[in-house]
Amino acid sequence: MFVTRKAEFSASHICRVAEWSDTQNHEFFGEEANPSGHGHNYVVEVTLEGEPDPVTGMVIDLKQVKSILEEEIVEPMDHRFLNYEVPPFDSIVPTTANVAREIWKRLEARFDSPAVRLARVRLFETADLYVDVIADSEMESALDGELAA
Ligand code: NI
């Protein structure tokens, strides 16, 4: 059984490769490379897999899920400039794919009980674009063919 909880945060970012020229960055990332940065209202859906407890009927304590999402995602990322305030985005490009992977890493360590496991992190950068990170897979897929930035 899969249980999904949603969280939202707003953050700014710049998508540029430090080793590239401004022209190269603009050609590849377009407006996403604008040096002043820009913001997104991110929506993240975190899916956990497990079976309902025979007594409580709950796969996991949902209060606990909410507080973990607050601690690992919302508090460190909401109203932050990802490139400057949220490691590792001082050294890797904060594309949707990389932010989703970082969220996965942070949550994976917190959902380590044998009864419940992290199954999927879905991160929307806009209503039209999301990236999935799925358990036991190195594959992340953007919904459409556009650049996941
Ligand atoms: Ni952007």
Image (cartoon, rainbow, N blue to C red):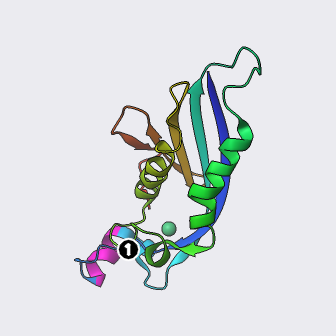
Tell me the residue at 69%/19% (across/down): 53
Please determine whether, in this image, residue 112 is positioned above or below residue 142: above
Please provide percent x and percent y for residue 99.
46, 58
Viewport quadrant of the N terminus = top right
Tell me the residue at 67%/31% (across/down): 60
- The residue that disc 1 covers is 90
Tell me the residue at 41%/42% (across/down): 141
Give, as a single range, the part of the protein colored magenta: 22-28
Depth check, front residue: 55 or 132: 55
Tell me the residue at 56%/56% (across/down): 72
Please provide percent x and percent y for residue 81.
53, 76
Depth check, front residue: 23 or 47: 47
Label 1: state its secondary structure. loop
* Residue 23 on the magenta span: yes
Please provide percent x and percent y for residue 63.
74, 42
Q: Is residue 107 left or right of residue 145?
A: right
